[in-house]
Amino acid sequence: MQLADFVLRRVCLLLLLSSFSLHAQTASAANPIQIKVVVVAMFERGEDTGDAPGEFQLWIDREHFDQVLPLAAGYHHVRLNKDGVLELLTGVGTAKAAASVMALGLDPRFDLTKAYWVIAGIGGGDPQDVSLGSAVWADHVVDGDLAFEIDAREIPADWPTGFVPLRKSTPYAQPMNPAENFGEAYTLNGALANWAFHLTKDVSLDDSDEMRTARARFKNFPNAQKPPFVTVGTDVSASTFFYGARMNEWANAWTKYYTGGQGNFMVSAMEDTGTLQALTFLDQAKRVDLQRVMVLRTISNYDMQAPGTQAADGLKDFGAGRYSAYMPSLEAAQKVGEKVVRDIVAHWRDRESTIPHWQP
């Protein structure tokens, strides 16, 4: 009788625990965690903490993302802190970024309907506009992949580039009809970007002797020779790491074409169009608010060679993982982005219902 009683008690306990687990899962879906801010990083070099950092690690250490939550359909687990700020690591490239953001956006554990998104990473800067270690809040994100392309050895002599817009037969052919946009350009909430800029424009950014030496090589580029600063400009996102004076010229022209002359190319990135495409679809599904999205890119390197040098020479450093302002740009992304995150959390009662904008 004692053995039978023990077995019965064990069975009842297992049934009770199973019932509790099912209730907890149901309650989680019925009462999702309200997220105030999603911080999006694109790459990490190794572990989340304790080694050489990528874009993910500094945020973890400084914003105390101590709760680790699995994201089975995404590239990497997510991290949550006590303030309702979530950090996502997408993986490198537009495809991983789009898939990871979609996985998070459809996850029933999280309420993202009022969440702000701070997409914070490093990129290559146009020396006509920015210096090493600078930070750029994006007003537009332009896709640098969606196009026709002719090999450089076969470009007609009167063409400025071998890149041709989809549905066109020559570079920059007019009219460029925004209604036909296949995802070639995204215009962000300019009032929010302007607010973020004014909130962060006086953040002190790291400088170094190495950066000063690299800047000095860009004679006749006044902005390239400045100490790091915060600004607003356009981001060209492409999974191909483009580099060189000719590619810089293309990125500027491509930006003007797809923004109707409104955008000024300042920084190159890889994942942002994938992220924004996923967020656009999630906005359509009422899962996120696209007007609450901010893109911040900081300058780890110039996107072209210094005067008097060859583009191919610059690739030797990138191939070896050497960037003139790698750590300062990581620091800038976290320090500038953190100021926006902290403001949103501190003023959540207002920020939840009203998107901030700059008021002189």
Image (cartoon, rainbow, N blue to C red):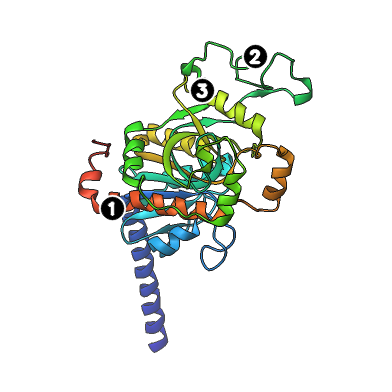
Q: Which numbered disc flags the more N-terminal residue, 3 or 1?
A: 3
What is the crowding at mark 1: few (fewer than 14 residues within 10 Å), some, or many (at least 20)?
Answer: some
Q: Is residue 149 above or below residue 342?
A: above
Residues at badges 2 and 3 in contact (C-beta under 8 Å)? no
At 45% from the left and 34% from the top, the residue drawn is: 233
Please tell me which residue lies in front, 22 or 248.
248
Q: Quadrant of residue 145?
A: top right
Label 2 secondary element: loop
Drawn side of residue 117 relative to residue 258, left or right: left
Q: Residue furthest top?
A: 175
Task: Give the amino acid at mark 2.
Answer: Thr
Residue under label 1: 345
Task: Give the amino acid at mark 1.
Answer: Val
Task: Give the amino acid at mark 3.
Answer: Lys
Residue under label 2: 170
Camera sees residue 106: no
At 23% from the left and 36% from the top, the residue drawn is: 359
Q: Is residue 34 above or below residue 186?
A: below
Q: Quadrant of residue 193?
A: top left
Q: Residue furthest left?
A: 349
Q: CA distance from mark 3 to mark 1?
A: 36 Å
Label 1 secondary element: helix
Q: Which numbered disc flags the more N-terminal residue, 2 or 3?
A: 2
Residue under label 3: 256
At 39% from the left and 78% from the top, the residue drawn is: 10
x, y (%) of residue 81?
Answer: 36, 60
Please tell me which residue lies in front, 329 or 343.
329
x, y (%) of residue 261?
Answer: 47, 20
Q: CA distance from mark 2 to mark 1?
A: 49 Å
Q: Which numbered disc flags the more N-terminal residue, 2 or 1?
A: 2
Q: CA distance from mark 2 to mark 3?
A: 16 Å
